[in-house]
Amino acid sequence: MKPIFFDFELPLLGTLEFPAYLTMVLAAFVVAILYARRQAEREGLRGTAIIDLGMLMLICGILGARLL
């Protein structure tokens, strides 16, 4: 697998690169949150609460990784 999944040039910011690992982890996270939302709605829970919780977990995970 290539280390850089894709990159493109932005006029004011320069080159924006997406590493393969980051892209795959982000895609898996999005699919997992959407699946959890669907399951929650089937159980009668609010799907938006699951998405909010997912975003909170993502932020806390990034902050926790930076602190360690």
Image (spheres, grey):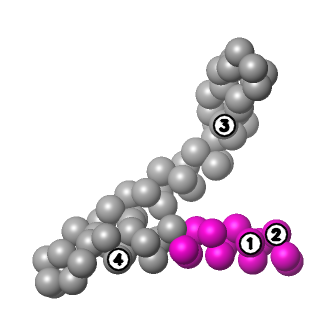
Q: Earlier in the sequence, mark 4 or mark 3?
A: 3
Label 2 with label 3: CB-CB less than 8 Å:
no
| Residue highlighted by disc 4 | 49
Label 2 with label 1: CB-CB less than 8 Å:
yes
Q: CA distance from mark 1 to mark 3?
A: 20 Å
Furthest residue toward right:
68
Label 1 with label 4: CB-CB less than 8 Å:
no
Residue 23, quarter of picture: top right
Q: Residue at x 54, y 53 (%)?
A: 26
| Residue highlighted by disc 3 | 18
Report whether 57 appears left or right of 42: right
Which element is circle 3 on?
strand
Q: Earlier in the sequence, mark 1 or mark 4?
A: 4
Label 1 with label 3: CB-CB less than 8 Å:
no
Q: CA distance from mark 2 to mark 1?
A: 5 Å
Residue 8 coordinates in the image, percent (x, y): 65, 20
Q: Amino acid at mark 3?
A: Phe
| Residue highlighted by disc 2 | 66
Q: Amino acid at mark 2?
A: Arg
Residue 62 part of the magenta segment: yes
Q: Which mark is on residue 63?
A: 1
Q: Residue at x 82, y 69 (%)?
A: 66
Tell me the quadrant of the picture where the N terminus can be found: top right
Q: Which residues are magenta?
A: 56-68
Residue 25, quarter of picture: bottom right
